[in-house]
Amino acid sequence: MDAIAPTHGEPAPLHPLIGRVRELIARREAHAARTVVLLPFAHLIPLARAAWAAQLPTGFAPRFETSMTWSLSASFVPADSDLAFDMGRDLLTARALLEQAGLASRADLLAGRVVQAAWQLAPAAAAVMPAARPAWAARARQAIAAGFDAPVLAMERAVAGVALEWAAVSSYAGDALLEGELAPALDLLVVVEGLRPEPFAAALASLLAGKAVSVPLAGKAVSVPLAGEAPPGAIRLHEAADPADEAERAAACVLRHIQAGRVPVALPAVDRLLTRRIRALLDVRGAGIRDETGWKLSTTRAAAHLMLALRACAWNASADAVIDWIKHAPAVPSHLALALERAVRKAGLRDWRGLRSSDLGDGPRLQSLLEQVNGWRDRLQRVRSLPQWLADLRGLLQETGQWPRLAGDAAGARLIAALRLDEGAQAEFQQLPQAARRFGLADFSAWAGDTLEADSFVPQPAGQEQVVSLPFNQLLGRPFAALVLAGCDELRLPPAPEPAGVWTPAQRLAL
């Protein structure tokens, strides 16, 4: 799909909304400084502020917030067992809860699934007054029991049950708003409706009763011509023969908009593989692209190097894994790493632990390197607490020369923050009872891998962008000159997206 934004005196996307807010403030005789406009997405906040400043450059302005930004303004600190919405920490809590539920033998398998299920339940639980959550949980237990009553769904029932109890007993940042004295502090709450209802915003509106108003954020309907050049503000559809043709057609549409001066062009990532193909074609032609979708931290080069070190330190590590690690360790001279690799290949060894000094000949430097590598590996063999794991892993990365590369790379810096590898950062885990359990290398590697899999890395823009690749829902309210939406078919862009999680439709209604 190829769309051109309106150009003939049409207002910016949020200007009609700001006009509506101004009307509501005037009609209800509210003060702008005592008005909160609750937006559905955080990316709309700076756009709404700019639209207000354009209409009223002087005087007071309302607070533009989302449910999350408004809740976090209360400086909430989760308790030890609360949902923290941080995978590294929540994995520890989920494992402890599974052990308490008698599922210790399945904790490694189920911990990540419990975290995901609890995160899906959290918006519904957070929208319930804290005093009413036990009653909400009681109704939810009945829904779970009815939906997962078959014997083959025993694991799903266990995951859902632990996640429900966790979500029900957790405190949330929004509790300060639900339990606080909102009404005296506000004259007006304007809830801007997004793509779907938001439970917490609805709870706030109900709490404030006559001081809350809901307004839609919706654009005009547009025609969809199937052929020919579309007028400004309309849409063109392109039929592609196969994925390669689709990528080429989409890239051609983007380049046509750039050549016509319609920038920036929005390129939503409906299909990530297709978007990568389009980006490759645009990169070859020198288009300036800003990526707002990012990618999983686990797929970055920094994460690959870290997990390579952990795999190489396993007691049963293959010779290939250890050699690969050594070749990527700056502390090992490249010629020595290659010489060691030749000796291992000549000996025909599959497992590193089978390598002996006699396999290396009389070379003293290779003998010394073997001792150094085995010393590095031995350091990660014993069990220890998570904070000690993090300190020892940081020390190993520093000795092998990998730490400066991680710290000097944007994705590596994000990895260090996600795993709390910085000196002193693991103090948070030292205060958590669930982090005191002793981890083996396999347990720690699984925890690190799951944490990196759940985190994302979004690179900083390198310069002036002509194309913006972004999540589909973040198109809402953005002032793009044109849109190229690749992947408009019944498989990748269905009329109703499948919600995440294992919940049945009946359970979703009840929860």
Image (spheres, rainbow, N blue to C red):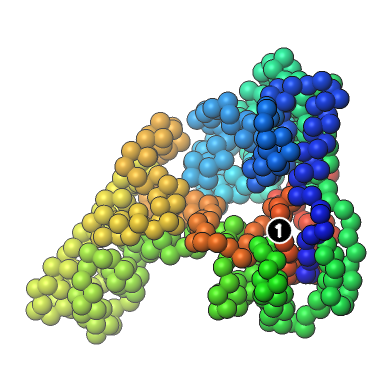
Viewer can see residue 76? yes
Which is more toward the observer, 376 or 482? Answer: 482
Q: Secondary structure at mark 1?
A: loop
| Label 1 neighbour load within 10 Å: few <14, some 14-19, many 20+ | some
Viewer can see residue 442? no
User: Relative to 161, does residue 307 appear above or below in the rendering?
Assistant: below
The N terminus sits in image quarter? bottom right
Which is more toward the observer, 47 or 474? Answer: 47
Identity of the residue drawn at 73% across and 64% down? 482
Q: What amino acid does circle 1 point to?
A: Phe
In the visual, does 267 lie left or right of 95? right
The C terminus sits in image quarter? top right
Identity of the residue drawn at 78% across and 69% down? 2
Locate residue 258: give its quadrant. Answer: bottom right
In the visual, does 290 lie left or right of 266? left
Locate residue 143: give its quadrant. Answer: top right
Which is more toward the observer, 485 or 311? Answer: 485
Residue designated by label 1: 480
In the visual, does 252 lie left or right of 336? right
Name the spot of residue 36 as percent of width and height, x first.
71, 29
Locate residue 350: give its quadrant. Answer: bottom left
Identity of the residue drawn at 13% across and 68% down? 368
Name the spot of residue 369 as percent of width and height, x first.
17, 68
Name the spot of residue 360 as percent of width and height, x first.
16, 78
Identity of the residue drawn at 55% across and 47% down? 111
Name the spot of residue 320 as percent of width and height, x first.
34, 74
User: Relative to 6, does residue 250 appear above or below in the rendering?
Assistant: below
In the visual, does 421 lie left or right of 505? left
The total number of labels drawn is 1
Which is more toward the observer, 360 or 5? Answer: 5
